[in-house]
Image (cartoon, rainbow, N blue to C red):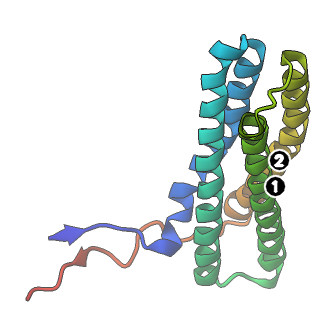
Amino acid sequence: MVHYFPGWNGTHALIVSIPIILLLIAPLFVIVGTVLPSAKGQPFLVWALILMILGTVTVFVAAATGEAAMRVLGPSPATQVALEQHRDLAGTTEELFLMLTLAFAALLFVPRLLGNEFESWVNSALLAAFLVFYATGALFLANTVHHGGHVVHELGHKAPVTGSGPIKEARQ
């Protein structure tokens, strides 16, 4: 049997779009969940959390594949600076979205666990404040994407998307 797999170092280009999409769609669910009455809005807030969790996990996967891709590039000293900036932004983005996701989960579940639900206007105000902080994370994500695009499109460094060719299973 023949398998085509680009290898870990070549999957960065395939994976990197997933967290971008998930993390930029999640705040729309928060907005809808905030403006709807509590009972109708709660499912949107839960789905926002699910999107944030999936997006945050895939940010870490994208960073890991990016590290692998950097090792095979063998960049010039000029490119090394751009890659380091991209790596630093990716690390900050990972940390921000981990904190944002945990904070959002706390906003959703801690009041219930303590049996002390917030009034509707307090909950809306907290979610609005959360969205302001989330916008910071989204800006870091966009800046990370921009720097990655700079490395690929302007400096011309791409990790190989195809691996060493087909991988054949060993015959026994």
The reply to whether residue 98 is visible in this rendering is yes
**In the rendering, at what x and y percent does residue 72 appear?**
58, 82
What is the distance, in whole Å, between disc 2 and disc 1 at their CAs?
A: 6 Å
Residue at x 58%, y 77% (from the top left corner): 68
> Circle 1 sits on which residue?
96
Residue at x 84%, y 76% (from the top left corner): 81
Q: Amino acid at mark 2?
A: Gly
Q: Quadrant of residue 32?
A: top right
SS for dot 2: helix
**In the rendering, at what x and y percent does residue 82 appear?**
81, 70
Q: Residues within 10 Å of mark 1 (few under 14, many from 20)?
A: many
Q: Amino acid at mark 1?
A: Leu
| Quadrant position of the N terminus in the picture | bottom left
Which numbered disc, 2 or 1, marks the residue that appears first in the sequence? Answer: 1
| Quadrant position of the C terminus in the picture | bottom left
Query: Residue 137 shows which numbered tag?
Result: 2
Query: Which is nearer the eye, 146 or 88?
Result: 88
Residue at x 67%, y 26% (from the top left corner): 29
SS for dot 1: helix
Q: Work out which residue is located at the far left of the displayed protein and give it.
A: 172
**Relative to residue 103, is residue 48 depicted above or below?**
above
Q: Residues within 10 Å of mark 2 (few under 14, many from 20)?
A: many
**In the rendering, at what x and y percent does residue 155 appear?**
73, 66
**Relative to residue 124, is residue 36 depicted above or below?**
above
Q: Work out which residue is located at the far bottom of the displayed protein and give it.
A: 172
Could you tell me if the residues under marks 2 and 1 are in contact, i.e. CB atoms within 8 Å? yes
